[in-house]
Amino acid sequence: MSSALPATAPEERRKAPRTDVDEPAYVASHGASTRCRVVNISADGAAIEVPDPLFIPDRFQLMTERDRAVRNCRVVWTRQNRIGVIFE
């Protein structure tokens, strides 16, 4: 008989739950902007997909196309073309 422990989910570090969305947006910094897509969002941050993360600065403004809300962002992780940000 084995006494294996049940598998547990990775620890959730987000303070607020994220809502899955598929919304066009723009990353803006130093007078330039790049189209992106918001994949999920919460009151504290978001995950966005960008054409090339090498051209995205560590801090930028994110403007969603639907409501034109502008949020100051800081990059906290990058995986391929997806970037996780927190709102400052």
Image: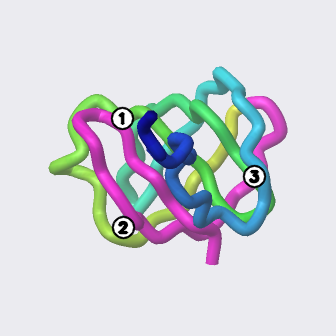
From the top left corner, tell me how far across and down residue 26 is, in percent. 52, 41
Q: Which of marks 3 and 2 is in front?
A: 3
Q: Is 46 or 12 nearer to us in this picture?
A: 12
Q: Which residue occupies 45% across, 65% down? A: 60
Q: Say which element carries label 1.
A: loop
Q: Which mark is residue 30?
A: 2
From the top left corner, tell me how far across and down residue 12 is, in percent. 61, 58
Q: For the residues marked 1 and 2, what is the alpha-carbon distance in whole angstroms?
A: 17 Å
Residue at the extreme front: 1
Comes first in the chain, label 1 or label 2: 2
From the top left corner, tell me how far across and down residue 54 is, in percent. 16, 49
Residue under numbered circle 1: 50
Amino acid identity at mark 3: Ser
Q: Nearer the viewer, mark 1 or mark 3?
A: 3
Q: For the residues marked 3 and 2, what is the alpha-carbon distance in whole angstroms?
A: 25 Å
Let me know if residue 22 is in the magenta part.
no
Residue at the extreme bottom: 88
Amino acid identity at mark 1: Val
Q: What stretch is highlighted in magenta?
A: 66-88
Residue under numbered circle 3: 42
Let me know if residue 68 is in the magenta part.
yes
Magenta span: chief secondary structure? strand
**Mark 2 crowd level (few <14, some 14–19, many ≥20, 10 Å Cα):** few
Q: For the residues marked 1 and 3, what is the alpha-carbon distance in whole angstroms?
A: 18 Å
Q: Which quadrant holds the C terminus?
A: bottom right
